[in-house]
Amino acid sequence: MISLALGAILAALAVLLTALPFIQHADDLDAPLDGPTPEQERRIAVIEERDRALAALKELEFDHRTGKIDDTDYRELVGPLRRTAAEALRIIDEGSAKE
């Protein structure tokens, strides 16, 4: 009987010691998160622009290969998308070089 009570106390102590770091830092969870700085927002916008341009290029390539878009329309559409993607990549590379 004593060993059962001692085991239960030991188990409760182990649970308490394991949970203690989480209980102590629970107040930090209510702290407001800092939003991105204007520079970070600009970088995120450029990354999203790059992703949209690359996705559009991928879709355009697929449509051209499957015959949904003819050569004339493809040549007309691919240039601006490539320039947009290249400009976004250049801005991202410049930002990475500064860091």
Image: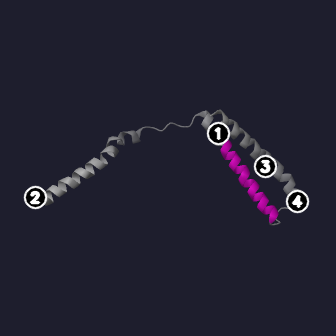
Q: If you read the primary sequence from the N terminus, does the residue marked by circle 3 or circle 1 appear first?
A: 1
The local secondary structure at tag 3 comes to helix
Using the rendered view, name the quadrant where residue 46 is placed. Answer: top right
In this view, 26 is above or below 6: above
Residue type of the residue flagged with mark 3: Leu
Q: CA distance from mark 1 to mark 4?
A: 34 Å
The crowding category of the residue bearing disc 1, from other C-alpha atoms within 10 Å (few below 14, some 14 to 19, many at least 20), is some
Q: Which is in the foreground here, disc 3 or disc 2? A: 2
- Is residue 11 found left or right of 95 in the rendered image? left
In the picture of the structure, the residue carrying the numbered disc 4 is 71
Do the residues bearing badges 2 and 4 touch, measured as CB atoms within 8 Å? Answer: no
Discs 2/1, front: 2
Q: Main secondary structure of the magenta part?
A: helix
Q: Which residue is mark 3?
A: 81
Give above or below for 35 relative to 9. Answer: above
Residue lying furthest bottom: 66
Residue 52, image x, y percentages:
70, 50
For marks 3 and 2, the one nearer the N-term is: 2
Mark 1 = which residue?
43
Span colored in magenta:
46-65
